[in-house]
Image (cartoon, rainbow, N blue to C red):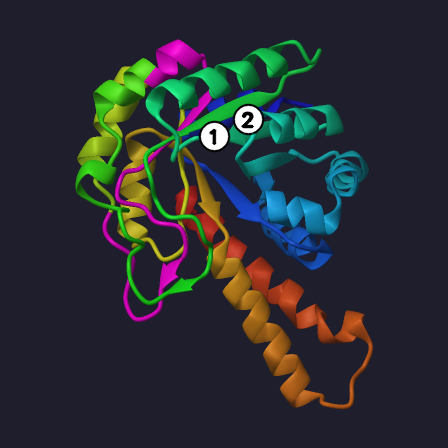
């Protein structure tokens, strides 16, 4: 089976991007997988520190690996937003396919130093583990927002091409997540801000590695398409899935107040996540 690096290269060569879907439970995993399987597309499952603590670090590895082996399917597992070197090492040791060290709120020097340590550990692991670095602030919470997080999305919060080039060269990361107008979470009453597509291109031109777009939920569709054309190879979706899950569970409980079997209550949540992920995968891959 192809590696994540090979799959990413192949996807970008075709003009598309990999969908990265965060999960908190097995319903999310089945929903995301069935969406990818229905379109015959590879997929990345993401778990933040909180999500993998809830599921279990070794347990989520086993779940994703079991689907990969049973279906012989290109499904990969990413340790999303990890804030310490120790927890990056923990994910690599557990068997994750990729890891993110999120040093966006650190100084450039400290971010580079810690990211380099993560890269070195991954290279010495005896298997291929992609390491992603993060540069620039886009907020922290995948939730519904009343307003744009302070200090995110515009102006000095955007990653500069010069900083991106310096960071990529010094750390040797495989992937880079820049701040290009994207934000974590979704605005309640409007679309999220437009991405700075020119900045995406400028950064990609100087780092020459795939870019990762975090905070994809709520981003205007046309911005996804434009960003993928100029270098974004992976797009993260989380809040949209959480919203679909919540609404489906709420409806199930309202429609069937006497139902107590969790698997019956949660079937609609799996379908809702699948539908949301399917729509995003189609957009990311021109389908």
Whether 13 is drawn above or below 279: the answer is above
Instruction: Report which residue position mark 1 lands on.
Output: 11
Element class at badge 2: helix
Closer-to-camera residue (31/212): 212
Give the magenta part as a residue range. Answer: 167-194
Q: Is residue 170 magenta?
A: yes
Element class at badge 1: helix
Task: Indicate the quadrant where residue 210 lies.
Answer: top left
Residue density around tag 1, few if under 14, some if 14–19, many if 20 or more, within 10 Å: some
* Residue drawn at point x = 31 percent, y = 54 percent: 149
- Say whether residue 96 is visible: no
**In contact (CB < 8 Å): disc 2 and disc 1:** yes
- Say whether residue 36 is visible: yes
Closer-to-camera residue (258/111): 111
Q: Is residue 174 magenta?
A: yes
* Residue drawn at point x = 61 percent, y = 43 percent: 49
Percent of width and height locating residue 47:
61, 44
Tell me the quarter of the image containing the N terminus.
top right
Instruction: Report which residue position mark 2 lands on.
Output: 7
């Amino acid at each position: 089976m192809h590696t994540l690096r090979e799959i990413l290269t192949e996807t970008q060569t075709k003009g598309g991007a990999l969908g990265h879907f965060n999960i908190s439970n097995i319903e999310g995993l089945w929903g995301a997988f069935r969406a990818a399987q229905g379109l015959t597309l590879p997929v990345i499952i993401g778990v933040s520190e909180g999500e993998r603590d809830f599921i279990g670090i070794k347990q989520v590895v086993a779940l994703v690996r079991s689907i990969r082996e049973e279906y012989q399917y290109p499904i990969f597992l990413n340790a999303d937003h990890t804030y310490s070197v120790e927890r990056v090492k923990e994910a690599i040791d557990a068997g994750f396919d990729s890891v993110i060290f999120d040093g966006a709120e650190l100084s450039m020097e400290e971010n580079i130093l810690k990211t380099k340590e993560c890269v070195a550990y991954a290279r010495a692991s005896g298997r291929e583990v992609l390491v992603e670095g993060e540069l620039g602030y886009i907020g922290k919470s995948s939730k519904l927002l009343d307003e744009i997080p302070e200090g995110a999305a515009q102006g000095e919060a955007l990653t500069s091409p010069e900083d991106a080039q310096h960071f990529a060269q010094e750390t040797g990361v495989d992937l880079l997540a820049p701040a290009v107008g994207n934000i974590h979470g979704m605005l309640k009453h409007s679309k999220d801000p437009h991405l700075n597509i020119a900045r995406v291109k400028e950064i990609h031109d100087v780092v020459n590695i795939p870019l990762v777009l975090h905070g994809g939920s709520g981003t205007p569709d046309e911005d996804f398409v434009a960003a993928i054309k100029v270098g974004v190879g992976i797009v993260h979706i989380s809040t949209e899935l959480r919203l679909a899950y919540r609404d489906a569970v709420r409806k199930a409980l309202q429609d069937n107040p006497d139902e107590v079997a969790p698997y019956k209550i949660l079937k609609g949540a799996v379908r809702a996540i699948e539908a949301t992920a399917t729509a995003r995968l189609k957009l990311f891959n021109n389908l």
